[in-house]
Image (cartoon, rainbow, N blue to C red):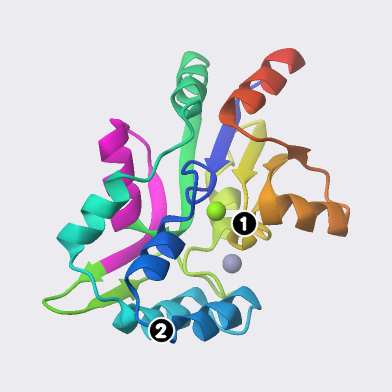
Amino acid sequence: MKRVYFVDFDGTITKKDTTDAIVSSFARDGWQEIMRLWNEGKLSTEQSARLILPYLQVSSEEAARFLREIPIDDTFRDFLTYVKARDEQCYILSDGFDFNISTVLEKAGITHLPVYTNQLIIGENSYDIACPHASPCGHCGTCKKTLVKKLSKEADQAVYIGDGYSDHCGCQAADLIFAKGFLLRYCRAQKIPARPFRTFADIVKYLENLA
Ligand SMILES: [Mg+2]
Ligand SMILES: [Zn+2]
């Protein structure tokens, strides 16, 4: 059986959400209300990013230094080894930013994974967002549901791994869900079957036991 894996980035691969960490460390006050409206589904990712980014008071160099200090789940590499040994594909789907992901993964020495996410456009004195993977749903910057459907056609089983609000829609297009945090609570409330996990080691262990 060939699987394909869809993995969220912030809070799933990293131990904390990189965008939340940057905003709460470097934005002047006022962003909280915008973030709240996004969390309630009242603003799209693109809208809320356009409103929040002007609050940021940090250079991209300083932001990169800050991001390099954010730890990842140290069992993620073992998970990638497991996937590679089975000759399967793993995609990162994120409603965060390419800049955060490439900075963190480069630091971790992980550079071969295909990533679908929003672009952080770094201007002279400002930031902007571009969403090349948006969809008609109108809410996601990167619509994970569309991507899971599109990228899982060749596989027998689509596996989804995530933790947050931006995963709640995409995970339902997968066959097997591993969830923690908000996503786990959401799946339980909606009676969507999901396996709880803490680290990628739990996932490998579970998948190995299936075999
Ligand atoms: Mg997340
Ligand atoms: Zn969507």
Of residues 101 and 58, the one nearer the viewer is 58
**Residue stretch in magenta:** 99-120
In the image, residue 60 above or below residue 94? below
Disc assigned to residue 29? 2
Few, some or many residues within 10 Å of mark 2 (<14, 14–19, 20+)? few
In the image, residue 50 above or below residue 198? below
Classify residue 132 by image quadrant. bottom left
Classify residue 174 by image quadrant. top right
Few, some or many residues within 10 Å of mark 1 (<14, 14–19, 20+)? many
- Mark 1 or mark 2, earlier in chain: 2
Dot 1: what SS? loop
Of residues 101 and 181, the one nearer the viewer is 181
What residue is drawn where x is 42% and y is 68%? Answer: 24
User: Given the image, on which type of amino acid does mark 2 rest?
Assistant: Asp
Q: CA distance from mark 1 to mark 2?
A: 24 Å
Q: Quadrant of the N terminus?
A: top right
Judged left or right of residue 201, residue 61 is left
Which residue is disc 1 drawn over?
164
- Ligand 1 within 8 Å of the CB at mark 1: yes
User: Given the image, on which type of amino acid does mark 1 rest?
Assistant: Gly
> Where's residue 128, x and y in %?
28, 76
